[in-house]
Image (spheres, rainbow, N blue to C red):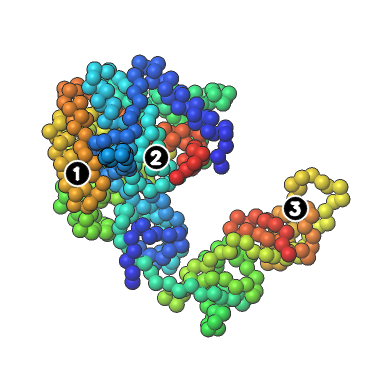
């Protein structure tokens, strides 16, 4: 049920997010929603619209995330920055946790590591938890109640390796499955349906969703060791370049945020964009023009250690306030 | 058998999962971070009654199981079996208590219900949203008890007890939601 109290509290949490990042000396940037070109990330499809003028018309795409604009902002010499921005994703179904239009918080730091940024996420989420307790005139507690579970947000947030989870849940070595042939062989043996159009990353995620995700712990943790082949905008791990320097934060078995060290070698990113372009042509999917401004901003950041996090604002608020359906946060849901 | 895509999934639909007939009792869309689109389903095994989750790739093709939906009249109960008769062919079918679930508390002789048959066996009963039942035992409300929302417990013709507003009298009909077991209204 929609109620004014929840809506006001949600609006207040957006103010609190802004206060937190401004206090940490982050510069805010307001992302432009209408984009004429986008980075080509696998599985991220934009909504397209038409700008009509008497003599001509031009295609525009709704922003799918603040990432490209924030990296352009950084390349101008900004140190740390953030955006709270409406993002739109096409071809994604609606669920109690997700709608095609959602509010994304994204922030970037220069000269930092994913270890530092993990500490910062925890500090930020604990801040927001306490802020909401105080705003409701309750004394802040380390715990929250979510779906009949009591979650301690102030205890350790450990790293859990995907390679380890694959080993204990599927008895397979994820490093071996990075090879197409091995993955298709393994998935077929396990009874997964393989069509001519089935891709490696579909099988990887299907195994993850069926065999690993149901057994994830409910306490907050960072899932690490994501394959580099599905993380094109992420830098790779120094000791093992097959895996990305990336993490996903899970709390209450819900994916709350994705963070990583940014890849700044544009030749690698260009290669992944070319592959994606080919895939979209073959599947006749939405193919926006490539954002070359994004690539040149990355070139300017080359050699700098840039880390960033993307976080679903509605989802975090739902977790902190024990809300089960995202639709109660807006007055008109598509 | 017909192949259907996950985009055609509907709650209550029957599909083949691991060479066994299953019913989709629930489904939702999931998009893992940086991953494609998937459909998470809750599947009930029609043979064992076990429920499990399985996540399909969006657009994946699965086999739909052929079923027939028949209008049947409830006749009588024998041990844990509920006997129904096809209204048109007069064929009789025995339905197990597992399929009726909680609805077993609300069924009475002569009720007409929709039953799904797979391979000659009843596998699913569509529960009506509302059932009308007679109150067979009810205490008289205490005079002067005017507290708004006050309730009392009465016995219904199927033997089940129900919390109803105090104005409901013995012999009256009430409408009940069999899924939640809640009183809905006074029925005529």
Q: Chain of mark 2?
A: A
- Picture residue at 40% right of the left edge, 24% below the top: A124
In this view, the residue farthest toward the left is A267
Q: Position of residue A293 (x, y in %)?
A: 20, 29
> Residue A193 vs residue A334: left or right?
left
Q: Position of residue A311 (x, y in %)?
A: 36, 32
User: Is residue A160 something that shows in the picture?
Assistant: no
Q: Which residue is mark 1?
A: A276
Q: Quadrant of residue A218?
A: top left
> Residue A200 vs residue B67: left or right?
left
> Residue A277 vs residue A140: left or right?
left
Q: Are marks 2 and 3 on the same chain?
A: no
The answer to whether A62 is drawn above or below residue B155 in the figure is above
In this view, the residue farthest toward the right is B143
Q: Residues within 10 Å of mark 3 (few under 14, many from 20)?
A: some
Q: Position of residue A127 (x, y in %)?
A: 44, 23
In this view, the residue farthest toward the front is A54
SS of the residue at dot 2? strand
Which of the two discs, 2 and 1, labels the residue nearer the N terminus? 2
Q: Which residue is mark 3?
A: B165
Q: Are marks 2 and 1 in contact (CB under 8 Å)?
A: no
SS of the residue at dot 3? strand
The answer to whether A15 is drawn above or below residue A312 in the figure is above
Q: Which residue is mark 2?
A: A101
Mark 2 vs mark 3, foreground winner is: 2
């Amino acid at each position: 049920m929609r109620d004014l109290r929840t809506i006001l509290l949600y609006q207040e949490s957006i103010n609190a997010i802004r206060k937190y990042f401004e206090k940490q000396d982050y510069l805010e940037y307001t992302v432009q929603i209408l984009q004429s070109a986008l980075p080509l990330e696998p599985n991220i499809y934009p909504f397209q619209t038409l700008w009509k003028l008497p003599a001509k018309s031009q295609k525009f795409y709704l922003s799918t995330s603040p990432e490209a604009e924030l990296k352009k902002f950084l390349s101008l010499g900004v140190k740390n920055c953030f955006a709270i921005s409406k993002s739109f994703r096409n071809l994604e179904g609606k669920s109690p946790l997700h709608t095609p239009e959602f509010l994304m918080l994204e922030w970037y730091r220069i000269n930092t590591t994913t270890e530092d940024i993990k500490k910062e996420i925890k500090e930020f989420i604990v801040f927001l938890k306490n802020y909401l307790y105080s705003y409701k005139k309750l004394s802040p507690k380390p715990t929250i109640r979510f779906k009949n579970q009591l979650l301690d947000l102030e205890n350790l947030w450990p790293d859990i390796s995907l390679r380890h989870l694959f080993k204990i849940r599927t008895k397979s070595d994820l490093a071996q499955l990075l090879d197409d042939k091995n993955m298709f062989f393994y998935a077929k043996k396990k009874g997964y349906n393989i069509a001519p159009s089935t891709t490696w990353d579909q099988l990887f995620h299907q195994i993850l969703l069926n065999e690993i995700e149901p057994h994830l712990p409910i306490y907050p943790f960072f899932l690490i060791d994501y394959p580099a082949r599905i993380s094109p905008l992420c830098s790779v791990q120094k000791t093992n370049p097959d895996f990305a320097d990336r993490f996903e934060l899970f709390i209450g078995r819900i994916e709350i945020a994705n963070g990583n060290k940014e890849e700044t070698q544009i030749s690698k990113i260009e290669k992944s964009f070319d592959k994606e372009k080919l895939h979209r042509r073959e599947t006749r999917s939405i193919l926006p023009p490539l954002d070359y401004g994004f690539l040149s901003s990355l070139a300017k950041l080359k050699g700098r250690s840039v880390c960033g996090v993307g976080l679903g604002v509605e989802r975090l608020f739902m977790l902190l306030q024990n809300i089960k359906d995202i639709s109660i946060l807006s007055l008109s849901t598509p | 058998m017909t192949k259907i895509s996950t985009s055609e999934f509907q709650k209550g639909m029957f599909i083949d999962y691991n060479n066994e007939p299953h019913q989709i009792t629930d489904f939702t869309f999931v998009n893992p971070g940086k991953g494609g689109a998937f459909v998470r389903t809750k599947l009930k095994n029609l043979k064992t009654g076990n429920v499990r989750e399985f996540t399909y790739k969006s657009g994946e093709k699965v086999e739909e199981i052929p079923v027939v939906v028949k209008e049947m009249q409830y006749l009588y109960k024998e041990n844990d079996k509920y006997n129904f008769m096809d209204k048109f062919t007069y064929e009789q079918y025995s339905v197990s208590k597992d399929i009726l679930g909680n609805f077993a508390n609300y069924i009475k002789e002569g009720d007409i219900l929709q039953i799904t048959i797979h391979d000659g066996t009843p596998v699913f009963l569509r529960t009506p949203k509302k059932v009308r039942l007679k109150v067979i035992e009810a205490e008289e409300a205490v005079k002067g008890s005017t507290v708004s929302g006050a309730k009392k417990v009465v016995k219904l013709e199927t033997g089940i007890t129900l919390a109803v507003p105090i104005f409901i009298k013995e012999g009256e009909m009430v409408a009940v939601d069999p899924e939640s077991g809640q009183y809905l209204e006074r029925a005529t």
